[in-house]
Image (spheres, coloured by chain):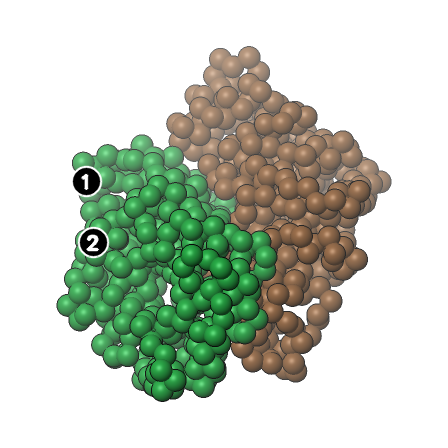
Chain colours: A green, B brown
Amino acid sequence: MDKEINLLQEIDTPAIIVDINIVKENIHKYQRYCDDIGIKLRPHIKTHKIPALAKLQIEAGAVGITAQKISEAEAIISEGGINDILITYNIIGEQKLKALRNLANKVKTSVVADSSFCIEGLSKTFEGAKEALPVLVECDTGANRCGVISPQEACDLAELINRSPGLIFSGLMTYPPTSQAQKINSFLTNAKKLIEAKNIAVNTVSIGGSPDMWKVKDIPVATEYRIGTYIFNDRSLVENKICSVKKVAMTVLATVVSTPTKNRAIIDAGSKVLTSDLFGMNDHGSIVNFPELRITQLTEEHGTIVSEQNTNLEIGQKIEIIPNHACVVTNMLNEVNLITEEKKIKKVKVIARGKVW
Amino acid sequence: MDKEINLLQEIDTPAIIVDINIVKENIHKYQRYCDDIGIKLRPHIKTHKIPALAKLQIEAGAVGITAQKISEAEAIISEGGINDILITYNIIGEQKLKALRNLANKVKTSVVADSSFCIEGLSKTFEGAKEALPVLVECDTGANRCGVISPQEACDLAELINRSPGLIFSGLMTYPPTSQAQKINSFLTNAKKLIEAKNIAVNTVSIGGSPDMWKVKDIPVATEYRIGTYIFNDRSLVENKICSVKKVAMTVLATVVSTPTKNRAIIDAGSKVLTSDLFGMNDHGSIVNFPELRITQLTEEHGTIVSEQNTNLEIGQKIEIIPNHACVVTNMLNEVNLITEEKKIKKVKVIARGKVW
């Protein structure tokens, strides 16, 4: 991205920079991959949180989008063009159930559930609705987060969903631990068989995760892939050799504000932009064109860069950082600076930022 | 805070809860402490980011406020009542210098600098201004962030400031490493002596930091204390025995959304509310009334609670979490839920959220 450096000089820092050319390339490349192997793609909008980018994903061939929360979904559909949303979250509590019903009145909405408590709430809310709410059973295939922990439980909940007024069982969903393809496939295949033995169709088996994006074939039971980070990529994916640095579409632009010693420089991007997410790595991002420099510490408004040699950075100099984790960075600021195809800077609002309800 | 639990049931989660009674108690207690030992208090508004709370700090006797960034200062003065701001940041670049001059036209503003580059920019901007801009020299007394690294450099910059049109040297400032009182005092005392030997007055010596808030006397050279977290307190201060749990004014309210096993429960507060800040601790906050439960993992929208025994948590149950680090949590959501003195919930906008410029 260094060819854009003159363009970037205009931007006040710290700032998020998104290159639309790379975004489009990333979207189309993975869509083609999914098309080729015959799996549906349902991108997770949590990475970008921007309606215009969700629409690019749909236009490229995605079957719909994934959102984690109802408020996030409401924000992402606010500009139109999105008609199919899967909320991969247990919807609990009256306020959220009411909001879910409102959402389902606007666009085709499906959700997940991993307990009878959750299913009962959904059923009470959708009983009498014009269309039944599609519900997938979330399965814990090794991530130790939400999800039923056995195929038999998945089958029991599938039956409960189909017995519950206002609901229809529509498949299985898992939040995938990385690199356990065999375990995931076996859990989901067993659950599918048990459910089908009850004469219930399992239309969708939804898996996902950027780290395993090129290994979808290892989980043949899957019919749908959910993926977020691939649109921007980030340092975690570069370090894990899932993508090259050239395919990173989002960076953080920062200014050097202090060079107290020759080995240390301080930038104006701290944890309020880059976040403290480490994702198991050392340091807080990598600096484009300066591989020998390390961002070793963040406080809220300062990043500390150190080098064993002279940093050679000068006060006022702007640098681009590839953040450890793209999705959390777009949650910190209200807007991103999009580099358009015409090489103009366009400020775009991160409409679904902070939508945690 | 458990007595408020019925009140909290109304609040959709995840949410930030602030108890105004405890806030006021914290503000007044520390103001009295500073008054008693004869040091000025200049609270850092980065913890709360809310004009009404800044005004409470001023009304209690603070000499002014501290902000890290100009945009943060602009936000905090937007409701009036704040007339004295120290920006503890090197202001670099034309856009920010212009904004600084605008800010200084509205309220009494002072800044820091740790380089001739920074001082030259300030001078160009304030040359010809009606009033000279007060500039403190930032000293690195051990934190290894910004700041000159020797008393002689501090003296050289003090002289440069006073030679520079539009500027006036007004003192020394340090971002303090904790528990190095003697080193801090010695650096600042030496710098002060060198500067005074040049017939330049050192009106202010500004130190700070919540972890050392009760040890101010160990740095007798200081005239002013900057402090942020004390208004809310957080888990890091509780664990370091700086305050008791009863003095924690801010918590995160979350709902249990899944109980996949008896040892594990999942809540709807993840890193998009609690952040990944660990501050050297294990786990991601402590749960009020459930000391045996641990929040061992966060993803963006999920927190994982584990217990060696049965968690005894039920889906739909609301719990209160004391976050590791208060300041970063108020940066995640657009509003907090204030529990008023009349025990009502009042939604208050976090006006300076995300103001990183």
In-image side of A91 versus A211 (left or right): right
Against B12, residue A122 (above or below) is below
Q: Answer whether residue A125 is visible to the viewer in this image.
A: yes
**Badge 1 sits on which subunit?**
A
Q: Residue at x 17, y 71 (%)?
A: A37
Residue tagged 2 = A60
In-image side of A88 versus B345 (left or right): left
On the image, the x and y values in percent for residue B266 come to 55, 69
Q: Nearer the viewer, residue A140 or B133?
A: A140
Q: Nearer the viewer, residue A202 or B262?
A: A202
Q: Quadrant of the N terminus of chain B?
A: bottom right
Residue B84 occupies quadrant: top right
Against B109, residue A188 (above or below) is below
Q: Crowding at label 1, few (<14), some or many (≥20) Cα neighbours within 10 Å?
A: few
CB atoms at circles 1 and 2 under 8 Å apart?
no
Residue tagged 1 = A341
Q: Nearer the viewer, residue A95 or B60?
A: A95
Q: Please name which of the two marks, 1 or 2, marks the residue nearer to the observer.
A: 2
Q: Secondary structure at mark 1?
A: loop
Q: Residue at x 44, y 24 (%)?
A: B98
Q: Secondary structure at mark 2?
A: helix
Q: Residue at x 64, y 71 (%)?
A: B314
Q: Crowding at label 2, few (<14), some or many (≥20) Cα neighbours within 10 Å?
A: some
Three-letter code for the amino acid on which mark 1 is drawn: Glu
N-terminal-most mark, 1 or 2: 2
On the image, the x and y values in percent for residue B219 come to 72, 46
Three-letter code for the amino acid on which mark 2 is drawn: Ala
Residue lying farthest to the left in this orientation: A36
On the image, the x and y values in percent for residue A183 come to 36, 84
On the image, the x and y values in percent for residue A335 come to 39, 40
Against A193, residue A83 (above or below) is above
Against A349, residue B18 (above or below) is below
